[in-house]
Image: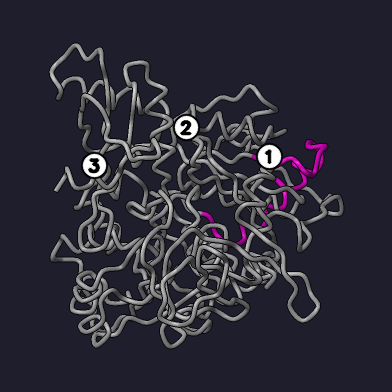
């Protein structure tokens, strides 16, 4: 699929249709096409190095989408950064990318690397008509479209590179996910995840590919039940792309039902485990809707499997399956020795296919550890070792958690070692271990076990002080809910922290 071509065609056939709306800000397809063209020309004329990505900073602002498309048209990859990410963490990303350009669409982030372009300047640029589109050289198939930074075990985020080919192959499938392409055309898609989180790719680009309207649910709206339901009602949404945790938030209000949202007919879930209870409640509240469960890491372009969760499946199968692989994808389950395991045996999930990333941005060591190249029908292809545990049954994939210390909380992928390394940046902490708290097969919160020899205040006061300091380095979703102070951490015979002992201590 040529996503830029699809947007251009919608701009010609339905120029006044709303493409993106966030709060009271909106852009039509005509504006999205014209503005991104003008900004792309400006980028091409003001950026000398095609290989240096562009940072786009903000929170679900329609002009962020203008920047994304402008980068692609000018042959530059982009790195989305949300205002909810601590400035110190954004700085780490900026240092690793060394951008020539940083677009600050909203917020007050300031960078010392390259040139920073603010919202007012962006608006000024896109209002200037230009016929210089001949200077544009859009991204080719194997060039990187976007880079999304995810949690890394060293405490430093890893940049997952997704090419134009990866994205196009994903969209060929996602426009058919749950319903036909024609059934999606012109419909309203709900956007829950920030653009710095790869789940947003499923709603943003699938929506634009079918000429739909992206209705963004901002952070402040999601925190207020009344505002949230009002926004949902006003949206007239037909398709909701979210994590199961967000669906649980919506379900806490009895008004979240088909009567209030008559056109909401498709739920697309990814990012964490969908429980039977959540699926049953949705099917009861929305009897005419489809509930689709999917699975896939950022490294394989959002998702690679799908299954419709019917009332029968929700009532009788636990845990729920995450689906069968999409066209162009093959799944293998491998043992520790790399041997492919037969159906029914649990092992590491290996993804082979046309949406697997070429690797991590400027991180050869991690790329070689997790990615590999193989040949299929004489053509080189990519494979990815997910670190996820699962098994296949009758061709259906079942997800069983992480092999290593990576978890998913509220849809966010988190390396527990990332939190530990950042805890140890605080001088008060001598030792740290972080564990997930799991209920009904889903991570509900995170606890940190700490050794703080010089603790000088009551535990509750000291814990709040440490959390506040930790917010300097980590986003809110990575802050442990509970801090548990210990004289020492239990150790295994080989000198590592005994996490099983800590886990049993919680129980």
In terms of image quadrants, where is residue 110?
Answer: top right
Query: Among all residues in the image, which is located at the extreme front?
Result: 493
Q: Which percent across, then down, holds residue 472?
A: 40, 25
Residue appearing at x 31%, y 76% in the figure: 320
Residue under numbered circle 1: 125
Task: Specify whether 326 is left or right of 360.
Answer: left
Residue under numbered circle 3: 502
In terms of image quadrants, where is residue 343?
Answer: bottom left
Calculate the distance from the C-alpha at mark 1 to the C-alpha at mark 2.
19 Å
Q: Sort mark 3 into few (<14), some (14-19) or many (20+) by Cα contacts within 10 Å.
A: some
As helix, strand or loop, the secondary structure at mark 2 comes to loop
Give the overall secondary structure of the magenta segment. helix
- For marks 2 and 3, give the one nearer the viewer: 3
Q: Which percent across, then down, holds residue 428?
A: 32, 16
Q: Is residue 78 visible?
A: yes
Q: Is residue 12 above or below residue 460?
A: below
Q: Sort mark 2 into few (<14), some (14-19) or many (20+) by Cα contacts within 10 Å.
A: some
Q: Which percent across, then down, holds residue 452?
A: 26, 20
The span picked out in magenta is: 27-54
Q: Is residue 457 above or below residue 232?
A: above
Calculate the distance from the C-alpha at mark 2 to the C-alpha at mark 3.
40 Å
- For marks 3 and 1, give the one nearer the viewer: 3
Asked if the residue at tag 2 contacts the one at tag 1, i.e. Cβ–Cβ closer than 8 Å, the answer is no
Residue appearing at x 26%, y 16% in the figure: 453
In terms of image quadrants, where is residue 244?
Answer: bottom left
Residue under numbered circle 2: 107
- The answer to if 35 sits in the magenta stretch is yes
């Amino acid at each position: 699929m040529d996503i830029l071509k699809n947007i251009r065609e919608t701009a010609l056939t339905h120029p006044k249709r709303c493409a993106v709306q966030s709060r009271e800000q909106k852009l039509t397809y005509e504006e999205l096409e014209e503005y991104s063209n003008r900004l792309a020309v400006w980028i091409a004329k003001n950026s000398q190095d095609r290989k240096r990505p562009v940072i786009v900073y903000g929170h679900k602002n329609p002009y962020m989408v203008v920047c994304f498309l402008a980068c692609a048209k000018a042959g530059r990859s982009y790195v989305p950064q949300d205002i909810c990410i601590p400035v110190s963490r954004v700085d780490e990303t900026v240092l690793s990318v060394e951008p020539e350009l940083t677009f600050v669409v909203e917020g007050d982030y300031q960078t010392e690397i390259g040139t920073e372009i603010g919202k007012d300047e962006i608006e000024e640029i896109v209002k200037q008509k230009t016929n210089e589109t001949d200077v544009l050289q859009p991204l080719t198939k194997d060039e990187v479209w976007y880079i999304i930074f995810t949690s890394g075990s060293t405490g430093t985020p890893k940049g997952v590179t997704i090419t134009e080919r990866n994205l196009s192959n994903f969209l060929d499938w996602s426009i058919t996910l749950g319903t036909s392409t024609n059934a999606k055309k012109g419909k309203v898609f709900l956007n829950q995840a920030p653009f710095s989180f790869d789940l947003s790719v499923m709603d943003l680009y699938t929506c634009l590919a079918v000429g739909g309207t992206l209705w963004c649910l901002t952070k402040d709206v999601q925190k207020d039940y009344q505002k949230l339901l009002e926004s949902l009602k006003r949206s007239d949404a037909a398709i909701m792309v979210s994590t199961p945790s967000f669906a649980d938030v919506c379900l806490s209000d009895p008004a979240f039902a088909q009567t209030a949202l008559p056109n909401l007919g498709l739920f697309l879930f990814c990012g964490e485990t969908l429980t039977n209870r959540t699926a049953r409640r949705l099917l009861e509240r929305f009897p005419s809707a489809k509930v689709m469960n999917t699975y896939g890491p950022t490294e394989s372009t959002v998702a690679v499997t799908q299954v419709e969760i019917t009332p029968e499946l929700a009532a009788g199968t636990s845990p729920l399956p995450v689906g069968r692989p999409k066209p162009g994808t093959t799944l293998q389950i491998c043992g520790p020795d790399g041997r492919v395991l037969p159906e029914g045996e649990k092992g590491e999930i290996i993804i082979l296919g046309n949406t697997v990333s070429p690797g991590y941005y400027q991180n050869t060591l991690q790329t070689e550890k997790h990615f590999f190249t193989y040949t299929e029908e004489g053509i080189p292809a990519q494979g990815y070792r997910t670190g996820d545990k699962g098994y296949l049954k009758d061709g259906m994939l079942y997800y069983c958690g992480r092999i290593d210390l990576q978890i998913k909380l509220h849809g966010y992928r988190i390396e527990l070692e990332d939190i530990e390394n950042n805890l140890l940046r605080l001088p008060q902490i001598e030792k740290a271990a972080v564990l997930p708290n799991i209920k009904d097969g889903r991570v509900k919160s995170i606890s940190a076990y700490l050794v703080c020899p010089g603790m000088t205040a009551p535990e509750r006061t000291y814990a709040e002080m440490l959390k506040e300091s930790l917010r300097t380095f980590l986003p809110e979703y990575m802050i442990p809910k509970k801090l548990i102070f210990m004289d020492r951490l239990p150790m295994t015979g080989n000198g590592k922290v005994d996490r099983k002992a800590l886990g049993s201590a919680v129980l």
